[in-house]
């Protein structure tokens, strides 16, 4: 596979982002896929970056973390980012591995981003690669 994949990662929760990137890289080391990482200020900005770079890559991996707070903001961001990433995948006809965590607290995010157990970045990378293989 000589594919190019862009990893777009929200850097809002830096520790969680680093873990997700590590899980993604662990999986992709087993492939010959060329990757680049672009950091977004938050998850809300990830779809914009994917759309902006859509001509240059065969697939994408979206990584980040949204943690529930005391307001409705969590639901707004989680729902809209998820919806827009799915829309982009269909519109662009390109796979987007979804590795954006939606957690109630930082402990859940740490657990789900742990590079050695159940890392969601690794799962997102696998999904993207599996879909590229269908091409």
Image (spheres, rainbow, N blue to C red):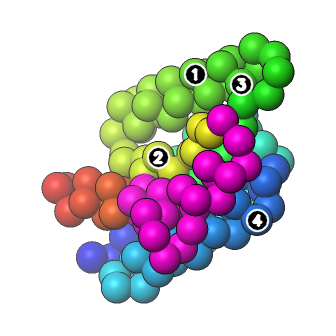
Q: Is residue 76 above or below residue 106?
A: above
Is disc 1 surrounded by few (<14), some (14 to 19) or many (20+) residues within 10 Å? few
Is disc 2 surrounded by few (<14), some (14 to 19) or many (20+) residues within 10 Å? many
Q: Measured from the top left, where is residue 5 in percent x and y?
A: 47, 64
Residue 98 tag number: 2
Q: Is residue 120 magenta?
A: yes
Q: Mark 1 or mark 4, which is nearer the start of the sequence?
A: 4
Q: Residue at x 59, y 53 (%)?
A: 63
Query: In the shown orientation, is residue 72 left or right of residue 122?
Result: right
Q: Mark 3 or mark 4, which is nearer the start of the sequence?
A: 4
Task: Kindly identify which residue carries mark 3.
Answer: 74
Is disc 3 surrounded by few (<14), some (14 to 19) or many (20+) residues within 10 Å? some
Task: Kindly identify which residue carries mark 4.
Answer: 15
Q: Measured from the top left, where is residue 27 in percent x and y?
A: 40, 76
Q: Mark 2 or mark 4, which is nearer the start of the sequence?
A: 4
Magenta segment, prevailing SS (helix, strand or loop): helix
Q: Quadrant of residue 126?
A: bottom left
Q: Quadrant of residue 45?
A: top right
Is residue 48 in view from this perspective?
no
Extent of the magenta region: 104-125
């Amino acid at each position: 596979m000589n594919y190019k994949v862009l990893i777009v990662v929200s850097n809002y929760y830096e520790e969680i982002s680093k873990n997700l990137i590590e899980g993604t890289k662990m999986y992709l080391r087993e492939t010959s896929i060329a990757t680049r990482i672009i950091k977004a200020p938050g998850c809300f900005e990830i779809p914009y970056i994917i759309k902006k770079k859509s001509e240059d890559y065969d697939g994408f991996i979206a990584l980040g973390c949204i943690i529930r707070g005391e307001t409705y903001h969590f639901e707004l961001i989680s729902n809209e980012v998820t919806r827009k990433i799915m829309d982009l995948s269909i519109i662009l006809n390109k796979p987007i591995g979804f590795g954006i965590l939606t957690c109630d607290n930082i402990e859940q995010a740490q657990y789900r981003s742990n590079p050695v157990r159940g890392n969601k970045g690794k799962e997102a990378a696998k999904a993207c690669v599996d879909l590229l293989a269908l091409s």
